[in-house]
Image (spheres, rainbow, N blue to C red):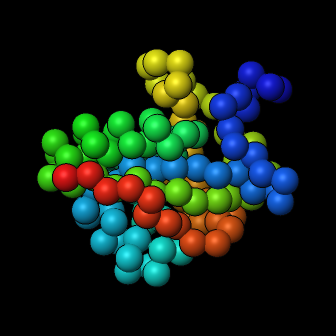
Amino acid sequence: MAQVHRGRVENPDGTTTLWRPVGPAELALLQESGFTAWPPRLPDQPIFYPVLNEQYATTIAAQWNVAASGAGFVTRFAVQTSFARRYPTQQAGAVEHLELWIPAEHVDTLNAHLVGTIEVVGEHR
């Protein structure tokens, strides 16, 4: 099980901390929700992929989101660990590039398992 759930920040309060890089459009949708819910995925986005460490999220926001849309933001949020453990850790390239791959149809369930609000912890332009 340790390999399946490697790289996670599981907290003593029963939550798991996750990060997600977003561009301006997704940030606007988060603002509309009061930073309480992730928006539904677009038809060409079958997976919602939060990442397991802030450095990886920062790299994506600074390199990919800025190049694609002029700005990138790093968000941090917590979900119930029991929900996060439904999804094995995925490695997307380098050893520190760890993600959860949550099917688009599970985003509503993810939102139901959020603990607290989604925070913006970094901005890149």
Q: Residue furthest top?
A: 94
Residue at x-position 83% and y-position 60%:
13
* Image coords of residue 7 (percent x, y): 66, 31
**Left or right of 119: which side holds 29?**
left
Of 43 and 102, nearer the camera is 102
**Left or right of 62: which side holds 31?**
right
In the image, residue 86 above or below residue 107: above
* Image coords of residue 39 (percent x, y): 43, 66
Residue at x-position 52% and y-position 67%:
118
* Image coords of residue 28 (percent x, y): 30, 71
In the image, residue 12 above or below residue 57: below
Tell me which corner region of the image, top left, top right, bottom left or bottom right, holds residue 89: top right
Of 8 and 36, nearer the camera is 8
**Left or right of 63: which side holds 19?**
right
- Residue 39 can be seen in this image: yes
Tell me which corner region of the image, top left, top right, bottom left or bottom right, holds residue 24: bottom left
Q: So how many labels did they put on this image?
A: 0
- Residue 47 can be seen in this image: no
Residue at x-position 35% and y-position 71%:
29
**Left or right of 29: which side holds 7?**
right
Quadrant showing the N terminus: top right
